[in-house]
Amino acid sequence: MADGKWRRAGATLIRVIAVWAASALTLLALAGILPDFRLQSDDGDTITRTAFTAAWGAGAFGLLSALVWPVLVRALLIVPALVLGALVFFLNGSLLLIALRLIPDGRGDAAPETAVVVAAVMSAVASATSTAFAVRDDDAYRRRLSRLAYRRRRGRPADQGGPGREGPPGTVFIQLDGVGHDALVAAAAAGLMPTVADWLADSSGHRLTPWRTDWSSQTGASQLAILHGSNHDVPAFRWYEKETRTVMVSSRPASALEMQRRAIERTRDGGLLTIDGASRGNLFSGGAGQLALVLSMAARRGKGSRSRAGYFAYFSDPANATRTALSFVAEVVREIGQSTRARARKVTPRVKRGGLYPFIRAFATVVERDVVVAAVLGDLFAGRTAVYADLVAYDEVAHHSGPHSRDAEKVLERLDRSLALIAKIADRTPRAYRIVLLSDHGQSPGETFAGKYGLTLKDLVRAGSGLPVPRRAQSTRSASEARDAVRIALHRPVEGGMDEQAAKLSDPIVLASGNLGLISFPDIGGRASREQIDRRHPALLSTLANHPGIGFLLVRSEEHGSVVLGPGGAEVPIAELSDEEGPLAVFGAGAADAVRRTDTFPHVADIMVNSMYDPGTGTVHAFEEQIGSHGGLGGEQSRPFLLWPRGLTDPLDIMAAESAEPGESVSAPVPPGGGLVGAEAVHRVLTRWLQESSGPQVPLRAEGFAGAGPVDEPFPPGAPGAGPTAARTARAIEPLPPPNRQDPAPDATGTTA
């Protein structure tokens, strides 16, 4: 054991000397290249003296980076996250100037702008050198990456894993936001995602199945149900609530917190991650005690709301900060180049990508990705039981470049590298981990409604209502989660619905959620009926239903109950809706049930509008400025995926067992269209998998409020977190009865029906 300690100490000393030498050589090279940077006296110095000066400066800069940088970053957590990212270069340059001042006899000097460049290059070289040495030493590599954790392993059970990787495995859920089942399969087959392709091809690896979203195919509805078990009364990404005259926006912190509170109140369940969980980059906490970049927590004040502290865990390493800052700049340049090329080639369909969008894209594809991945790696080393992380990069790029564009494919390549890193580190952690990959929805391509027809949905509604319409079609703001995340990082209020709230009560409020539109009449109490709408605006419903860009409407009738209206005067009572015929036939299996479910929501809009869908091309028309969209029915947006290790129970067997009567043999027929139905079903599957992985557990601490973080009191009766899931996890896991069906053989991609 003593020999091992000496070997580790010797290896550490060699790495330190190597990094020091590389940094000193970098200083010498830059001093010879940059005119405003010197390491010699005015009269000149010998080579030996200059080398000594470089070594001194490199050593001083390294010590300052190790000792002072973390303190500076922690102190600057009060500033917006993006501002912190922008300060990386300035802080690094300032540390270098201080290091140069510490060189004896004043031999080091640099102009401030030159110091920024020199510091960035030195940090990159030091990081590369340190990593190159560390990857050859498993222990060193593990120690280096474990520094990315938010919480050290102190205070955690010593027997949770260990060198032998004994004990129950943990589970990591990685959500690839917006990546549909078909897009994932195509990317793996094309070699864009080799890690995913390996999982699919390996007979002992993972299995893949699609699942079907609810009518509202967007992150707010899907992730709320996946993490908290219910998305009841979430009709869209944005919706209007008449009783409070407010617009709920899934990506607004206050709305996300309220959605989370309502879900917990309905299920009496703290969430998927209540027991030793971590929530990273999500809209909702899932009941986790460890939070980073969780939107719903951004609405709270106090210690429980400091999910932004995740930035400190990442940016406290100057090498990480510099690398991410440089990648951020490169991504901005890449987006400007790609959008310029698309305009020059007159690519269609196309939306505007100027203004702040390049920075929003860079935030989603670089900053959020790096911070979230780093947080997940820290959770692996901390040995957490369950981790759920959302990577939003693809979703943001696909909205503006298209889900099948080369831009989006490049993002999938980079996401696959992140998955490879997580998988590699999971093999080196003290605790074994199972990696589950999933998505919350897909994306459907298509020209925007305004681009195709020259007017927005709001313009069409106003025209059908006999209200004045602007001469030129105005853009409808995109419901981008990344855009709102940037505003939160900048401590700016999230926009959404302010103009609607200020509108006249007699004017209809029109909201967009991808290719799903919601129309509400704020001066009509409760849900407006078809008859009330016809009396006020006789031409509105027929104008909407017969427009070529609209597939169908949902509206309540006083005489027939809720009805679906379609082109050519089609009118079908909701009880008689069919997937085989009528207005919903082109939308495929499950469309009728999805519409019927949404019709029961208390806050369903007075008129629900779904755009047209062309099954031949798979295209829809978004009511927002998006050429890749999701939010309603039609195409790939409603077909996300679930990819899980083969050691876990098949999701269809889990669902069949839930529906079977006691003593009845389990049969799991594949639903029409394949896969699971609804995000709430995915929650039940993931909950079962956690039980299978970790065995019976008893939660020791309750959620203080809506999953905002643990408190020391035990669960009081009826408290959130003391509900069905807690009860299920507190008892032993009962094995499923053997199914009486044969598992379908996977195809070449590993997909099963």
Image (cartoon, grey):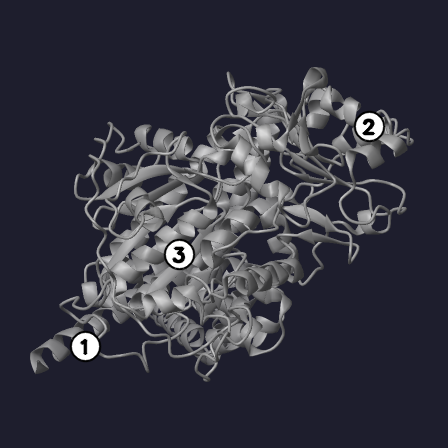
Q: Position of residue 582 (x, y in %)?
A: 59, 20
Q: Secondary structure at mark 1?
A: helix
Mark 1 and mark 3 lie on one chain; the one further toward the N terminus is 1
Using the image as rendered, state which of residue 42 and residue 21 is in the foreground.
21
> How many marks can you see?
3
Specify the label residue 266 is tagged with.
none
Q: Residues within 10 Å of mark 1 (few under 14, many from 20)?
A: few
Q: Which residue occupies 13% across, 68% down?
A: 164
Relative horizontal placement of residue 465, taking residue 91 as reference (left or right)? right
Relative horizontal placement of residue 241, taking residue 719 as reference (left or right)? right
Kindly tell me whether residue 84 is visible in this rendering: no
Using the image as rendered, state which of residue 377 and residue 566 is in the foreground.
566
Q: Which residue occupies 52% across, 75% down?
A: 74
> In the rendered image, which residue does mark 2 sit on?
540
Mark-to-mark CA distance, 1 and 3? 30 Å
Using the image as rendered, state which of residue 461 and residue 378 is in the foreground.
461
Q: Secondary structure at mark 2?
A: helix
Q: Secondary structure at mark 3?
A: helix
Task: Tell me the quadrant of the picture where the C terminus can be found.
Answer: top left
- Dot 2 and dot 3 residues touching (CB under 8 Å): no
Q: Which residue occupies 40% across, 56% down?
A: 29
> In the rendered image, which residue does mark 3 sit on?
29
Mark 2 and mark 3 lie on one chain; the one further toward the N terminus is 3
Q: Is residue 482 above or below residue 576?
A: below
Mark 1 vs mark 3: give the one in front.
Answer: 1
Q: Position of residue 575 (x, y in %)?
A: 59, 32
Specify the label residue 9 is tagged with.
1
Under mark 1, the amino acid is Ala
